[in-house]
Image (cartoon, helix red, strand yellow):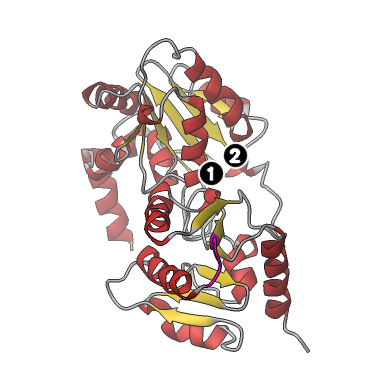
Amino acid sequence: MDSPIDGRLSSLRARMKEKDLDAFIVYATDQYLNEYIPQEENMRVYLSGFTGSTGNMLVTETEAYLFVDGRYYTQADLEVSKSLIHVIKMPYGTSGIQALRDQIKKLVESSDTASFTIGFNGRKVSYQDIHLLIQDSLDLGFQMDDTGDDLIGYPISPMEKENNGSLMTIPLSITGKSSSEKMQSIREWLIDHECDFVLISQLDDLAYLCNMRSYEIPYNSTFKGLAFLSRSEGHIFLNVNPIPEWIKEHFHGVFQVHSEEDFTEIIPKILVYKTDVPIKVGFDRDRTPYYTVNQLSQWVNEPGDLVQLESPLSKMKRIKTPEELKYMAHSFSQA
C-alpha cells in the first residue's frame, strides 16, 4: 500500500507536469521567512514527514531530495523514507542554498531536457537566494519559474484573524526608546543612505520597531506583518482584519496601521505620487521574500529604484539601551 508521503509526492509531480516544470523547490519557511512555523503549515513536513525546523526539498519527476544540516542527520534518518527521498547531509560550513545549487547543477548537467525549468514559491524564499539561482540559470541554461504558491493544497490552519488579542506592548521602562524615537532614527538613516523609503519585512525588526510582542508563532515572540517607512511617515501592515481601535490609538501620530491584505493596494498609491521624481526604495535582500521584491519592482519607475541595503533596524537592535541591559540582567538572574 502506498504511503501518504508517496501519494503527496505523486500529487505534486502531477501539478509539476501540468506546469511544465522539471523540478520544484519546497521551502520549510512561511511568507515571513520564519524558520519556526506550525507543522500543519509546513509544506516540507507535509511532503517528506521530516519535522525538523529547517531543511528544504528539491523534487523532480522521479526523485526527491531533502537537505539537512548536522543538527538533523539522525532525525532525518529516523523520519524520512529512504525509498522515496534522498537525504542530503550537508557538511559543516555548507549553506542550504549552496547545497541546493550544487544539486541543481548535477541535475541540469545530466538532463537531456532542452529547457530544464525549476519552479519555486517566491513568497517563501529570500530575494538573495533566488538571485543566486537565477545567476546559475544563466550559466547553465535552465529556467526559474515563480509559481507564487506551493502547487498543491495541504492541511493548514486557518489564518488567525483574532490574534490581536495576544499582541502586547512593551513599556518604555524596558525598551528605553519609543517607537517615535526609533522612527526618527530611521528617517536619519534614510537621509544618510539617500533613500526615500525602506521596506521592513523581518518580523523581529517589526516587533522591535513597534515595541510590541506576541506568541502567535511557535518559539517566537514576534507577530505577523511588515512595515513601509519614509522620511515623513510610517505604515504598519498587520495580519489582522479589522485593525483593533486600541492599536490605532496606540500608534496615533507615529504610524498608520493597516491590514496586511491592503499592502498591494496602499503601497502603489504611495509610490505613484513620486513618479515625477527619482525615488529610492531600500530593502534587505537576505531577509525579504523574492515575491515581495518582485511586487515592488512593478510599482517603481526603474529597477535601479530598488536599493539593496541591510535593514536599519538590524544595527539599532544590536545597540542596547541602559533600560534593555538592566532588564536583560534581571531576566538572566531569574533564569
State the extent of the magenta-drawn residues as a range. 112-117
- Quadrant for the C terminus in the image: bottom left
Helix, strand or loop at label 1? It is: loop
Question: Looking at the rendered structure, which numbered label has been put on residue 246?
Answer: none
Q: Give the residue drawn at x 59%, y 86%.
A: 81
How far across and down, in percent of the image, does residue 23 sit? 57, 66
Q: Give the residue drawn at x 44%, y 59%.
A: 141
Identity of the amino acid at label 2?
Asn
How far across and down, in percent of the image, does residue 276 sit? 43, 10
Mark 2 → mark 1, Cα distance in angstroms:
6 Å
Q: Determine which quarter of the picture holds residue 13.
A: bottom right
Image vertical order of residue 155 relative to residue 90, above or below:
above
Q: Determine which quarter of the picture holds residue 132.
A: bottom left
Identity of the amino acid at label 1?
Lys
Which is nearer the eye, 259 or 287?
A: 287
How far across and down, in percent of the image, does residue 213 sit? 47, 43
Q: Give the residue drawn at x 58%, y 71%.
A: 60
Is 31 magenta? The answer is no
Q: Give the residue drawn at x 28%, y 51%.
A: 328
Mark 1 lies on residue:
224
- Residue 301 visible? The answer is yes
In this picture, residue 2 sits left or right of residue 321: right
